[in-house]
Amino acid sequence: MTEAARRSPGTPCWVSLMVHGLDATLDFYRHLFGWEFVPGPRHLGPYVRALSDGREVAGIGELPPERRLAVAWTTYLAVGDADETAETVRCCGGTVAVGPLDAGEAGRMVICSDPAGAVFGLWEARAHHGTALSGPPGTPVWNELVTYDTAAVGTFYRTVFGYGAETGDPAEGDRVVLSVDGRPVASLRGAGGELPLGRGPRWMTSFAVADADAAARRVAELGGRVAGPVRDVPAGRAVLVADPEGAVFTLLGPPGR
């Protein structure tokens, strides 16, 4: 179990979701993870922070009605200077779509995409350091970039954030584990032609659950979609799901009995 602290640059520190129907989305995640919600900064419109056991674990906001964008969870990476890192992203072939801009007293943010098109955020913490709890059910526990191949974007992330990189087990295919200060913090997975048509490369968030099989059934009951089989992985038992607006994420439970 980990709690909030100022993260070293490059460490995933927050996940956020922008949706079209805020109330319905909050009901889905409330019943799935037991989250409660408190108001957050409103610099981009209606926005709440999700609480697990009273600690902030994620953000959910509402898109303006005229913005009919695809809905997806966004991984934010900690930075010491949002403006400087945004310029480095541009120089390394990425794109800066939003910001840098202030999120009240909480911090300074940027929305970017890497050279392959995967969207991610930069977060320069001030009052808000990010996810305050990771490990128990209902909290984010891992972030992975699913892309065409790791070699194409690995150089970009290593240059921008200074990551250490280690090739994963060959049995896992094209996978690279990224580290900060010698500690694994995220991974890159090359899926090649297996990426779903129209979705393209994207950062994926895994949320802990007590029982992956039961949680997958609950997703379907709540109007979401189970996007793949529940499977055993080195970290436990996992299943890919989507919420009612189509935001894809992974449920990760302990190994099956």
Image (cartoon, rainbow, N blue to C red):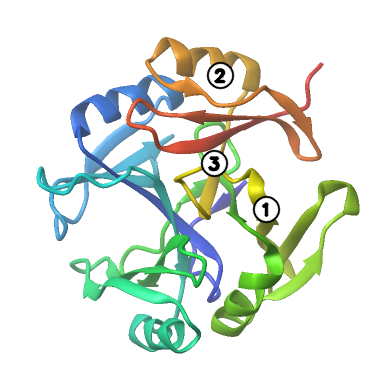
Q: Position of residue 157 (x, y in %)?
A: 59, 75
Q: Where is residue 250 in the image (x, y as percent from the top left)?
A: 57, 36
Q: Is residue 39 left or right of residue 161?
A: left
The label number, if any, that marks residue 216 in the structure image: 2
Which sits in the foreground, 254 or 240? Answer: 240
Residue 211 showing in the rendered view: no
The label number, if any, that marks residue 196 in the structure image: 3
Badge 2 marks a residue whose secondary structure is: helix
Question: Label 1, label 3: how many angstroms apart (C-alpha)?
Answer: 10 Å
Name the residue rendered at 20%, 44% in the picture. Answer: 68
Assess disc 3: are there few (<14), some (14-19) or many (≥20) residues with their C-alpha within 10 Å of its C-alpha. few
> What residue did someone put label 1 on?
192
Name the residue rendered at 19%, 28% in the picture. Answer: 23
Do residues under tags 1 and 3 come within 8 Å of each other at their CB atoms? no
Badge 1 marks a residue whose secondary structure is: helix
Which sits in the foreground, 238 or 57? Answer: 238
Q: Is residue 41 left or right of residue 73?
A: left
